[in-house]
Amino acid sequence: MTECPTRPHYRETVATAFDAEISTLAEEIAAAGAARRSRLFHVSWWSERLLDRAMANPGFKTDLFRFVDAFPATRDNDDVLDHLREYLTNEHAPGIIRHGLGLAGRLPGAGAPVAAIVARRNIARMAGRFIVGSSAIDARDALRRLWEDGFAATVDLLGEKTVTEDEADRYTARVTEIMHVLLDDAPTWPARPVLDADDRGGLARVNVSIKPTALAPSYAPLTRDAGLAQAKDRLRPLLALAAERGAFVNIDMEQADVKDLTFQLVQDLLDEPAFAGLEIGVVVQAYLRDSFRDLSDLIAWSSKRRGPLTVRLVKGAYWDTETVTAAAADWPSPVYANKHETDANYERCTRLLHDHHGEVKAAFGSHNLRSIAHAVAYARSLGIADNGYEVQMLAGMAEPIQAAIAGMGIRLRVYAPVGDLVPGMAYLV
């Protein structure tokens, strides 16, 4: 038999057609988001402009977030004004800010209080965009509003890193409290078919995300056994509560040095008889060079369970830390050096998740329209229903796009941080 000479060309043609489909879908989502922007979202004009300018000007972004990072430690109004002058009066700052600070300096007795009030108000507004509340009650009310508007949520308690057993106990108590508060309230929320069920059955309305380092002061490679034992001891009651009352627990991923510990933590606990059928979630970070292999291993393990694992696929939030740490220690970097490599690997992992639909559940955490459109288009090409997976985005980020995706009938889950101002500033930075 003669080999068909057109087969490579055929594959190239199919790939080109699929890529065009992805681009068209991304443009449709962007257009739908633009149409919703003015109707649905009412953000402070000043805070919006400030963030837009920061994103467009790397120098100003650095200075602004240096100030935001230092702000919680300022002592009084004069100290706030001194920090504003130090960080925001150089050539990177917009003229209106330089002019305003210059005017504040010429108002004896009044300049510092006015500057401090304006700074506090706008920092609170910025933090309020990304943090849904400071308490369990705040979170309950915010998540109810999100649900009523057609958005699911997962709660993340800020201030996670612990260095003592007492801090880890307090974190665990906070998670327990917020789970109880939400579990008591969630049954009264209105029916939302897209949020209440996927193509396999019902979904938990209460969804929390937990960082293992907050559960265990010894959660590190050199104290692996002690860290895993501490994390398991604090996580078991939370999983038992989830199993008893119908909540969902995600185990977040952090720095690369604890990645393998986290995968082991999840697998060890779910292999215990008490949790044999429990469905929980874990995170895979596509910027890690070994993420595709890790994902393949997780899928193989999940396929043997009664309840499939949910994998939240993200790009990764610790790129700077990973590259600086690796360079300082003269180690090979665990992350891809270039963004396009991460983006390509994200799509590769997306296809792997969809190819094993049913053996694992997929959640795609991204604000990148190409990445989202690729996940949607590839799922549809396999005949996977739009409610067979979900898209996840951070609270306060790309809200018009969130609304556009939800408007398509795809489940949109908001990653909703809860915490006080100081840990909130760290999260914002």
Image: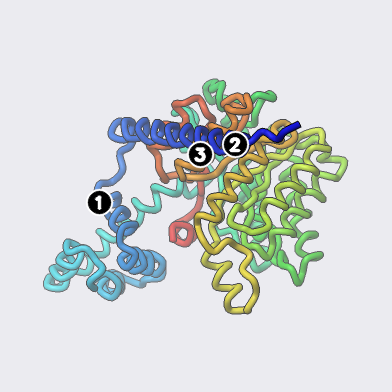
Residue at the front extreme of this rendering: 2
Answer with the quarter of the image where residue 61 lies. bottom left
Q: Residue 372 carries which label?
A: 3
Distance between the alpha carbons at the discs numbered 3 and 1: 29 Å
Label 3 amino acid? Ile
**Horizontal and vertical percent for residue 417?**
51, 48
Residue 202: x %, y % from top left: 66, 25
For the N terminus, the image quarter is: top right
Q: Position of residue 221 (x, y in %)?
A: 74, 68
Residue under the image location 86 percent in, 45 percent down: 272
Residue to which mark 2 is pinned: 11
For the question of whether residue 331 can be seen, the reply is yes
Give the mark toward the camera: 2 or 3: 2
CA distance for labels 2 and 3: 23 Å
Q: What element carries label 2?
A: helix
Q: In which quarter of the image is the C terminus?
A: bottom left
Q: In which quarter of the image is residue 380?
A: top right
Q: Please state which of the two labelled residues, at mark 3 or mark 1, is closer to the viewer.
A: 3
Q: Categorize mark 2 by other alpha carbons within 10 Å: few (<14), some (14-19), many (20+).
A: few
Measure how far apart labels 2 and 1 are at the Cα level. Answer: 50 Å
Badge 3 or badge 1: first in the primary sequence: 1
User: Mark 1 — residue?
Assistant: 46
Q: Do the residues labelled 2 and 3 touch (CB within 8 Å)?
A: no
Q: What residue type is labelled 2?
A: Arg
Query: In the rendered structure, which disc, 2 or 1, sits on the residue that comes first in sequence?
Result: 2
Give the residue at the far right of this rendering.
273
Q: Viewer-proximal residue, 154 or 77?
A: 154
Q: Nearer the viewer, mark 2 or mark 1?
A: 2
